[in-house]
Image (tube, grey):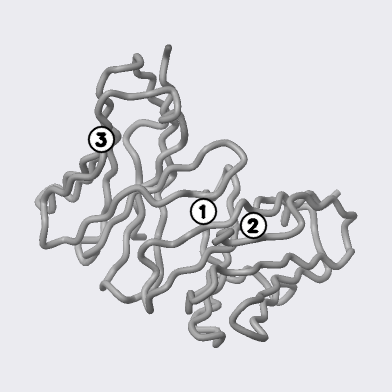
Amino acid sequence: DAGVIQSPRHEVTEMGQEVTLRCKPISGHNSLFWYRQTMMRGLELLIYFNNNVPIDDSGMPEDRFSAKMPNASFSTLKIQPSEPRDSAVYFCASSDRGGSEKLFFGSGTQLSVL
Amino acid sequence: GESVGLHLPTLSVQEGDNSIINCAYSNSASDYFIWYKQESGKGPQFIIDIRSNMDKRQGQRVTVLLNKTVKHLSLQIAATQPGDSAVYFCAEIVNFGNEKLTFGTGTRLTIIP
């Protein structure tokens, strides 16, 4: 298996633009998580899905952030409009259990908002 | 509020020596803990986990110790190798199956050749 696949690896955009991050979880995994990593805050859970259904989005910072999981093999995290403080590494992770133990992380998307 | 924190932000160890990375947690209700390793430019990678009904668990060259009395977790890496250089995070779950991992701030381990 190729593992969790995220795209793009790097994204540079201007403030106000829409940004869409993509994730393909490991086949057969039924839970998907979006994390954000910054030097100041470390790793923060934004939202997670179980069987394609959003379970907890309390970590989503603002209404500018939205996430979808239209099917078991694809998820998106969208920021609209983007702001410089959104600059971070965004990780997608999946697990094959109902709980989040043994998360398998993707390589992340480095987002820079200018 | 409740948080997971690390005593040492950086640690340098001579290659071949053993290393110990420490983690303090404040939520006594946490019942499941995981150690992750993150290499530069990569996502965190699962190393080892332990449930609160255990105080020790061993893997390949790694051992996790849990002291619930003082709410302390440690990761021991034996015979360190250059490939062990990374940032190590402890993470906790309150109520196993809850699905929400809380990560600590991380410790950077550097292996000196």
Whether discs 3 and 1 lie on one chain: the answer is no
Disc 1 residue crowd, few under 14, some 14–19, many 20+, Cα 10 Å: many
**Position in image of residue B1 (x %, y %):** 36, 60
Residue A95 image-quadrant placement? bottom left
Q: CA distance from mark 3 to mark 1?
A: 26 Å
Q: What residue does disc 2 label?
A: A90
Q: CA distance from mark 1 to mark 2?
A: 9 Å
Question: Could you tell which of marks 1 and 2 lies nearer the N-terminus?
Answer: 1
Residue A96 image-quadrant placement? bottom left
Instruction: Look at 49% across and 42% down and name the residue there.
Output: B38
What amino acid type should be assigned to the residue bearing mark 1? Leu
**Position in image of residue B97 (x %, y %):** 31, 76
What amino acid type should be assigned to the residue bearing mark 2? Tyr
Q: Secondary structure at mark 3?
A: loop
Q: Secondary structure at mark 1?
A: strand
**Position in image of residue A38 (x %, y %):** 60, 48
In the rendered view, would you say B23 is above or below A53? above
| Quadrant in which the C terminus of chain B appears | top left
Q: What residue does disc 1 label?
A: A43
Chain letter of disc 3 in the image: B
Are the residues at dot 1 and dot 2 in contact (C-beta closer than 8 Å)? no
